[in-house]
């Protein structure tokens, strides 16, 4: 059974750090790009970051690229999002999602549309999300 399960969310003060984890099962990460999205209450879901597990290439949206880092451990089928210098506006439910690399062909295998383009490739799998609350 294909599953993506997020963990690591919680409550943190501004300036603090969290590391989110996405555990994948039922498919081989080598053939997928894994992306993190987030959705704040009353707002649209937005892309945060993504990683190609085949070559390690990453892309992170401008609003968080100086503070967030995506990484993966293919042996463990895990993807992580290290979040530093957290701000109140980072409060959201964070989701991981997977898209097969074949679906990136229309985008010339550019990672940016996955994160920043509302007309992003259709994601094959989604996790249930983990809540991050940043408050003082």
Image (cartoon, rainbow, N blue to C red):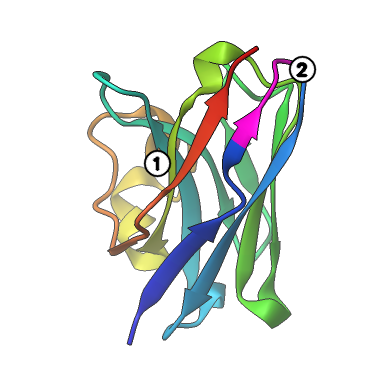
Of residues 69 and 19, the one nearer the viewer is 19
Q: Secondary structure at mark 1?
A: helix
**Residue at figure coordinates x 67%, y 63% from the top left:** 55
Estimate the x, y position of residue 130 in percent, counting from the top left: 46, 47
The residue nearer to you, when weighing 42 against 46, is 42
Residue 113 painted magenta: no
For the point 62% across and 22% down, which residue is it?
64
> Does the residue at mark 1 contact the one at mark 2 (Cβ under 8 Å)?
no
| First in residue order: circle 1 vs circle 2 | 2
The answer to whether residue 5 shows anywhere in this view is yes
- In the displayed structure, 135 sits above or below 122; it is above
- Residue underneath mark 2: 15
Along the viewing direction, whichever of 2 and 134 lies nearer the viewer: 134
The front one of 10 and 107 is: 10
Residue 9 lies in quadrant: top right
Horizontal and vertical percent position of residue 39: 35, 31
Q: Is residue 54 visible?
A: no
Q: Is residue 136 left or right of residue 118?
A: right
Q: Quadrant of the N terminus?
A: bottom left
> Would you call the spot at circle 2 few (<14 residues within 10 Å), some (14-19), or many (20 or more)?
some
């Amino acid at each position: 059974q294909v599953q993506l399960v997020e963990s690591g969310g919680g409550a943190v003060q501004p300036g603090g750090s969290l590391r989110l984890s996405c555990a994948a099962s039922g498919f081989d990460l080598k053939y997928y790009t894994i992306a993190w999205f987030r959705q704040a209450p009353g707002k649209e879901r937005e892309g945060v970051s993504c990683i190609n597990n085949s070559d390690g290439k990453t892309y992170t949206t401008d609003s968080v690229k100086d503070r967030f880092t995506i990484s993966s451990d293919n042996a463990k089928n895990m993807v992580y999002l290290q979040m530093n210098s957290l701000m109140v506006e980072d409060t959201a439910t964070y989701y991981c999602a997977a898209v097969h690399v074949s679906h990136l062909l229309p985008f010339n295998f550019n990672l940016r549309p996955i994160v920043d383009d509302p007309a992003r490739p259709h994601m094959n799998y989604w996790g249930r999300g983990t809540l991050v609350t940043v408050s003082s």
